[in-house]
Amino acid sequence: GDSRWSSSAGFGDYDRDGDLDLYVCNYITIDWDNLPKPGPGMFCTYLGRPVMCGPRGLKGARDTLYRNNGDGTFTDVSESSGAFDRDNLYGLGMVWADLDNDQDLDIFVANDDGPNLLFVNDGKGKFEEQGILSGLAVAVDGRNQGCMGIDAADYDNDGLLDGFVTNFSNDYSTLYHNDGNLFFSDITGETDLYTAEWPLVSWGTRFADFNHDGWKDIFHANGHVTPFLIKEKLEEQYFQPPSFYLNDRGTFRDVRKLAGPDMQVGKCGRGAAFADYDNDGDTDVAIANLNDSPQLLRNDRRDRNHWIMLRTVGRTSNRDGIGARITVTTGQMRQIWEIKRTVSIYSASDPRADIGLGEATKADLIKVQWPSGKVQEFRDVAGDAHYVVDEEKGLSKGY
């Protein structure tokens, strides 16, 4: 069998043939009969204590891109397509996203203790790796980080998808601003995210507009990997509460302590999935905790902002409309949302678009660009309702 330790996987129609292709992140290659022992060796201690080795010193595993053949089978096209993890990096999280606004899906991969990868889709079935050239591979000072969770979304409403990756402790989780033309800047320090992140080991994450003011916020789960910290009184703790940052028109405020008692509880969090599980019109969060029960954090909003939630149904495009781009205009504000299930790490999320309208009671214009190339427009759509957008039938109310 395959000896690679797979970590995350995501579906996206990179060749726009109506079938969902699959990218699989692989972390390390395991030899179960010769596992390294904690303690001895350069990469088998932490804070002077013996721990499980890695990732440095272990053999990385190459990621895989599988093309959907349309008949229930898949073909490994990693090398032939150019979406090729040449250095066998420690892959953890990935997201499909149109980062260059050319109407096809690119691949952004978060790697542990190595440069992140950006495979840019040329629209003809081929990719070119541009992680370093784009600025998404490393931190602002050129360091590799211990990247794990990942997302891409337009947090500042400028029409370009930005990036966010969560990282290991004694570092910060990184916000990359899309400057256009496939250039990204690490602006974490400029958005008030830097200091709060330093002692955290951060995992599943997403941009989402939790208070429906029209600006996408950031949530991520946290939890350490070294159990000896349970008995230690250090700044780094094994059990860590999640992080929650409200977007204040392009900068972020740490509001976890204001988000209810359950947001103060330390856990060893890993995957985080995002969904409107109770269909009340806002995004809730489910967290998978190591050696513990999962948490379901229900969003009980106290604001009076309005919203629209959209589920896409593809016909010529893939069934769930994965990769469709939705643009919602209310007054002077224009928001974009790309439909996806894979985001964060170790999880899959509700693919519906959750759009905050702020004080507006309707969307002036909703524009849907389908993977097939079809474009639909709907005007004066009433807020505070769930809708279905069908590639053939158009817009109707429903879940």
Image (cartoon, helix red, strand yellow):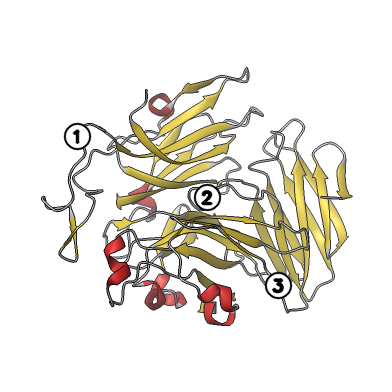
Task: Provide residue 299's location: percent of width, then percent of height.
Answer: 67, 68
Query: Disc 3 marks which residue?
Result: 300
Number of the label disc, if any, that sits on residue 99: 2
Task: Provide residue 25's location: percent of width, then percent of height.
Answer: 42, 39
Horizontally, residue 25 falls left or right of residue 102, namely left
**Mark 1–mark 3 CB contact (< 8 Å):** no
- The answer to which of 229 and 180 lies nearer the viewer is 229
- In front of the other: label 2 or label 1? 1
Horizontally, residue 148 falls left or right of residue 288, namely left
The amino acid type, in three-letter code, at marker 2 is Leu
Secondary structure under the numbered disc 2 in the rendered image: loop
Query: Disc 1 marks which residue?
Result: 34
Q: CA distance from mark 1 to mark 3?
A: 49 Å
The amino acid type, in three-letter code, at marker 1 is Asn
Q: Is residue 165 visible?
A: no
The amino acid type, in three-letter code, at marker 3 is Asp
In primary-sequence order, the first of circles 2 and 1 is: 1
Q: Residue at x 78, y 63 (%)?
A: 280
